[in-house]
Amino acid sequence: MYQPLLPVVKPLIFEGKSGILTITHKYGDQARLYVREGIIEHGTTNRLEGKNAVATCLRWVNITTSFDEGQTEPFSTDSEIDTNDVLSFLEKSAKNIAVIQKRIRDDQAIFQIDSQKLNTATKLSADDLKIALLFDGKKTIEEILPLAGKSELAVLTHTCRLIMAGVAEQVSAKDILPEEKRTELLEAIEDRLIDLVGPAGAILIEDALANIGTTAERLAAEDIEPLLNEIGSMLDEEEQEDFRAWAEKQTWE
């Protein structure tokens, strides 16, 4: 869930609270901020400590939080952590996140880029353009984040700039088949291909999925016909006729 950290941290500082603030990031990391009488004295993530850990978690957006007031653990105070700087950064980022919440539904949103508008846009930065190159009308925000080499907040901010410039447009998410249905369908296709071409059948399916721009996990109802056609095109003439005749007899609903 996209949310700013400011409404969580600000009261702890202004009310002089002491305890441990736990921030859980959707993408597999967790931070702990050690607060004493309203001052952030230390921080950790799964990989970082001190000032770097604090700076990292401040740029998480898809988060959940909890505060254990009065809880203490041994830690070494990091004098480089400036609580006022933390608060100032969160006040600025909260404004960005308010825009993000309006423009991007969630991390499953998919965007495509209008290349003509991208080429004529005059107010986009080099970093905006780098993020634009990652959007292909197929990848979700969640899939793009590890490719971007930037913080979640930065990626979402650049995406909003692209949207507001009219360069990026959200596309409708495909109606992804339920896992049981996807498994049943792909296993049936693989069994048939093994009868026709042997163990290479599984490889044909992987290649066909890649060629139509999807994966087994993202297979949608609208992908079934393109997938069957793509597999058929990889077979020789006799195998192709056999496969297509078999496919026509199947009910994929």
Image (spheres, rainbow, N blue to C red):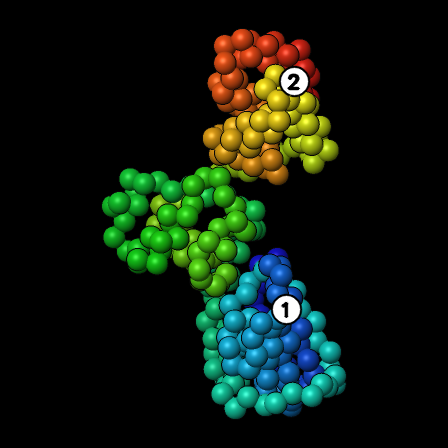
Q: Residues within 10 Å of mark 2 (few under 14, many from 20)?
A: few
Name the quadrant containing residue 175.
Answer: top right
Instruction: Tell me which residue sits at (59%, 87%) in the image.
Output: 41
x and y, in percent, of residue 142 in the image: 54, 51
| Among the two numbered marks 2 and 1 on one chain, the one whose residue lies closer to the N terminus | 1
One can see residue 76 in this view:
yes
x and y, in percent, of residue 206 in the image: 55, 32
Residue sitting at the far front: 198
Determine whether, in the image, residue 9 is placed left or right of residue 86: right
Q: Which residue is mark 1?
A: 30
The correct choice, above or below, for 114 with respect to 245 in the image is below
Q: Amino acid at mark 1?
A: Gln
Q: Secondary structure at mark 2?
A: helix
Q: Amino acid at mark 2?
A: Asp
x and y, in percent, of residue 79 in the image: 52, 91
The correct choice, above or below, for 196 with respect to 127 in the image is above
